[in-house]
Image (cartoon, grey):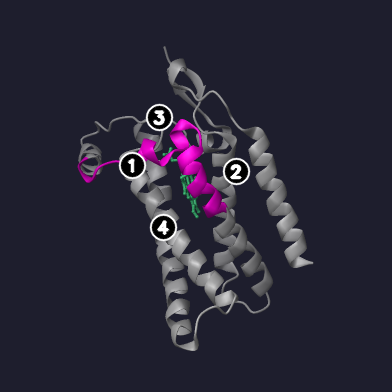
Amino acid sequence: MQERILVWDWPTRVFHWSFALSFAGAYLTAESERYRDIHLALGYIFAGLLVFRVIWGFIGTSYARFSSFSFKPNAVLSYLQSLPKGQAQHFLGHNPAGAVAIFLLLGLGLLISFSGIVLDRELASTNWEDLLAETHEWSANLMLFVVFAHIAGVLISSYLHRENLAKSMLTGFKQGQPQVAISRSFLWLSLVMLLAILVFLVTYLS
Ligand code: HEM
């Protein structure tokens, strides 16, 4: 019996949309001297969210854990091969192809954050600065490309399985067997995250 069950806890959802917004905002303000403070503030929020997500990947609810979406290359290949045949296997958590995009987004995010923080804090010697600045810019452009692939993947998967994945990332719910639902949503933790973001933004920009 399929029911409406909770799959994505609150912190994962707040992470997702804050991560997406902070990336978009930081990307759009990257070239402008006028919006430099906003770019930096969003960059630090982006980095903080990543640190949270890495920790949550080990201690979070079942579908948020890295172990639940670490697939072998063979599993990714056979999932991709099953797509054109219209026989894609359904996954309640992240599917194998989506998981690759997610690890790429998190990895690139870490590279962008590391290079950005080292540059902003002037921690590198002058010799390394150019390389870091190039790395920062190229990894952000590559990330934008992966974001488009990620959104295309979400749309394709939503169409193939007749389910609205973007809505699930908002509400946390999907159709599934009640016994595989997560039992805690951790609303309190997501409120702490939102408060921390707000306090950081106000302090940094004032
Ligand atoms: C309109 C834009 C977007 C939509 C509709 C969207 C939708 C989604 C959905 C539905 C999932 C869950 C996929 C699944 O069911 O397996 C997801 C996961 C994810 N998305 Fe997006 N996304 C968007 C933009 C972004 C952007 C801009 C980023 C990065 C900057 C991003 C990063 C991620 C990450 C890291 C995950 C994994 C979530 C986790 O497990 O913590 N998304 N997204």
Please rate how many residues cluster around mark 1, counting C-alpha atoms within 10 Å: few if below 14, some from 14 to 19, many from 20: some
Helix, strand or loop for disc 1: loop
> In the rendered structure, which amino acid carries the disc numbered 3?
Leu
* Marked residue nearer the N-terminal end (3 or 1): 1
Task: State the extent of the magenta-drawn residues as a range.
Answer: 49-74
The crowd level at tag 2 (other Cα within 10 Å; few <14, some 14-19, many 20+) is: many
- Name the residue carrying label 1: 70
Q: Which residue is mark 4?
A: 107
- Residue 158: percent from the left, percent from the top? 40, 36
Residue 32 found in image quarter:
bottom right
Q: Nearer the viewer, mark 4 or mark 3?
A: 4
Please name the residue that numbered disc 2 is placed on: 14
Residue matched to label 3: 92
Kind of residue indicated by mark 1:
Ser
Tell me, yes or no, whether the highlighted magenta stretch contains residue 191.
Answer: no
Q: Say which label, 2 or 1, has the lower sequence index.
A: 2
Q: CA distance from mark 3 to mark 1?
A: 14 Å
Q: Nearer the viewer, residue 118 or 133?
A: 118
Instruction: Look at 68% across and 77% down and name the residue there.
Output: 34
Please tell me whether mark 2 sits on a helix, a strand or a loop. helix
Q: Secondary structure at mark 4?
A: helix
